């Protein structure tokens, strides 16, 4: 809540600029209903709709659930978990490289959880037959007990699950996994019967019960997909309102046709995604129903295939389940030709700024080994890029300061004639080449950079728990040593309602640099404006106290560089005056 309040305050100070940028650069991520209506009609017979087989009853812990059935363990440098042999469900996955908090003894991140836990989240895959199929051959379902070729899945040892029905038709699922977060999954049918099998494969992700979300308006959490080169983002409330199984007519985005692409559910830092063969034509479905519990589903169905007696059929695809690390996403995007897979990270409306900003900071991090140093280096880079604009602005401000005695004389000359005074001031500005508005230009340019950097710090996993030096252990979180804890001397949890005044050391330093920079500027002629400008450093100190420490670090360093540049320019111009 503290982040939201502070961000609202900051946006209030710059809303006009944000509106202008939104007008110039409108969001172009979600597919419009008109385009969808032309391209995504689908045959309902090949969808992920199914009779629900979700268990009900007392909520249990994951540890209690995973002991109830035979399982294949998953062990990689990045993942640990298991596949339930009852139903061949991928429902247990832990991210080994990430903890829930900065405490090293805190729990690792649980991505997938089995049914009957508080928030089940898992991947199901299998085959379906058409409603008018007359062969009536049994297909594996969530109650089928699969056999396995091995009890452990590792990057060096794939496993194959198999199940044979009464007609001697064998169904196989081969799992392979790399060292990060990508599974290669192959479904195979060996038809050793005398029947012709007419089926289609399906794969889906289920989230049961509404997951805990940050519910922050600048962050998307929920359904995400990329089909037909259109990024679709829908919150859970949109799935329940638009894609309910009880609705005869659903919104167009609930059913689509596509070739390739990907789909899944995204959290702030983590994601699960189904990735079909990029040359495969699929039918995509998003569904919600509630039989006592919310059930969100996202998945796809492959094409109908006829498998003759004595033949077999394979169906391939991939599953991503893990942290949204840009380097890893781009690697998969390049190697497997997955369209815009790096857009799984919520870059936001200013993606034309957030992506380059992150790439630059990450490049500096690769050389410095510390994200705090990388942010400082990025600040220097921004000052270098904006140097001509800032130089022009500071020169104009220095001239304004130089002209202050003359401006005061004009006020005294025309105390009761404001129009003549303004005319005289304009003539003076023109003669000396001063521009009173020029001082605002660097701030106008900095605001979108500021919010883009805030977005980068907020959504990128690379910044998650990234330390700086001293007391800053997480650059993506506010300065932990606040005024109300006597900068760490008193240990207590400050209530959210008091977070605005719990100012840390870094925000105080930032406020001081802002005050010092303001002292170099010419005082506004209007007394009311002068008073407003005088309190701005204090206002921004309180506002930025709840922002990420990395953002405050950027602003403080930027102020220091501005002070240095401004002081040198003023010294040069004022020296000319004395010559």
Image (cartoon, grey):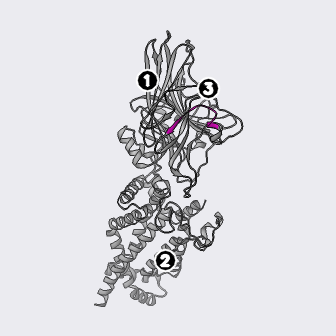
When the figure is inspected, residue 29 is found, relative to residue 254, above or below; the finding is below
Residue at the disc numbered 1:
314
Residue at the disc numbered 3:
143
Pinpoint residue 552: horizontal percent, then vertical percent: 48, 67
Residue nearest the observer in this picture, 355 or 375: 375
Rendered residue at 49%/56% (across/down): 464
The picture quadrant where one finds residue 165 is top right
Secondary structure at numbered mark 2: helix
Residues tagged 2 and 3 counted as in contact (Cβ below 8 A)? no
Q: CA distance from mark 2 to mark 1?
A: 66 Å
Query: Magenta includes 452?
Result: no
Q: Which residues are magenta?
A: 65-74
Residue at the disc numbered 2:
512
Pinpoint residue 310: horizontal percent, then vertical percent: 44, 12
Mark 2 crowdedness (10 Å alpha carbons): few <14, some 14-19, many ≥20: some
Secondary structure at numbered mark 1: strand
């Amino acid at each position: 809540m503290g982040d939201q309040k502070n961000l609202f305050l900051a946006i209030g100070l710059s809303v006009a600029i944000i509106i202008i940028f939104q007008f110039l650069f409108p969001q172009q991520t979600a597919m419009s209903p008109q385009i969808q209506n032309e391209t995504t009609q689908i045959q309902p017979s090949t969808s992920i709709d199914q009779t629900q087989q979700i268990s009900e009853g007392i909520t249990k812990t994951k540890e209690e659930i995973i002991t109830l059935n035979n399982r294949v363990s998953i062990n990689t440098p990045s993942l640990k978990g298991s596949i339930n042999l009852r139903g061949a469900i991928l429902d247990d996955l832990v991210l080994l490289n990430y903890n829930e908090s900065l405490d090293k003894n805190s729990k690792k991140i649980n991505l997938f959880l089995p049914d009957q836990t508080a928030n089940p989240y898992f991947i199901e895959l299998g085959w379906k037959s058409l409603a008018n199929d007359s062969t009536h051959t049994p297909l594996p379902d969530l109650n089928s007990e699969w056999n396995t070729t091995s009890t452990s899945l590792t990057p060096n040892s794939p496993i194959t699950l198999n199940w044979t029905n009464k007609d001697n038709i064998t169904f196989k699922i081969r799992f392979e996994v790399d060292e990060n977060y990508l599974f290669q999954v192959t479904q195979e049918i060996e038809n050793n019967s005398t029947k012709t099998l007419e089926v289609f494969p399906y794969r889906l992700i289920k989230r049961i019960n509404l997951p805990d979300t940050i519910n922050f308006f600048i962050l998307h959490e929920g359904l995400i997909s990329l089909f037909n080169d259109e990024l679709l983002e829908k919150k859970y409330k949109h799935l329940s309102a638009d894609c309910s199984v009880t609705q005869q007519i659903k919104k167009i985005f609930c059913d689509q046709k596509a070739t390739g692409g990907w789909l899944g559910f995204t959290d702030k830092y983590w994601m699960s995604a189904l990735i079909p063969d990029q040359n495969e034509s699929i039918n995509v479905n998003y569904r919600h129903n509630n039989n006592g519990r919310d059930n969100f589903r996202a998945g796809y169905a492959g094409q109908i295939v006829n498998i003759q007696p004595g033949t077999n059929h394979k169906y391939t695809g991939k599953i991503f389940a893990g942290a949204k690390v840009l380097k890893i996403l781009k690697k998969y995007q390049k190697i497997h030709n997955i369209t815009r897979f790096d857009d799984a990270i919520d870059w936001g409306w200013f993606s034309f700024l957030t992506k380059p900003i992150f790439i630059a900071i990450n490049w500096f991090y690769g050389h410095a080994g510390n994200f705090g140093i990388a942010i400082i280096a990025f600040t220097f880079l921004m000052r270098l890029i904006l140097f001509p604009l800032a130089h022009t602005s500071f020169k104009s401000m220095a001239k304004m300061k130089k002209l202050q005695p003359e401006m005061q004389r004009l006020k005294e000359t025309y105390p009761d004639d404001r129009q003549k005074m303004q005319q005289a001031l304009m003539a003076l500005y023109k003669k000396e080449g001063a521009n009173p508005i020029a001082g605002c230009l660097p701030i106008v340019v900095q605001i979108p950079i500021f919010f883009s950097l805030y977005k980068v710090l907020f959504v990128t996993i690379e910044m998650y728990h990234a330390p700086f030096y001293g007391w800053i252990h997480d650059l993506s979180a506010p300065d932990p040593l606040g005024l109300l804890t006597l900068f760490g001397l008193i240990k207590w949890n400050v209530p959210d309602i008091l977070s605005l005044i719990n100012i840390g050391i870094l925000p105080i330093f930032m406020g001081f640099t802002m005050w010092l920079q303001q002292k170099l500027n010419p005082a506004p002629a209007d007394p009311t404006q002068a008073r407003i400008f005088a309190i701005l450093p204090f206002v921004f100190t309180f506002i930025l106290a709840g922002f990420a420490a990395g953002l405050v670090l950027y602003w403080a360093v930027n102020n220091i560089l501005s002070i240095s540049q401004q002081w040198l320019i003023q010294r040069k111009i004022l020296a000319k005056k004395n010559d």
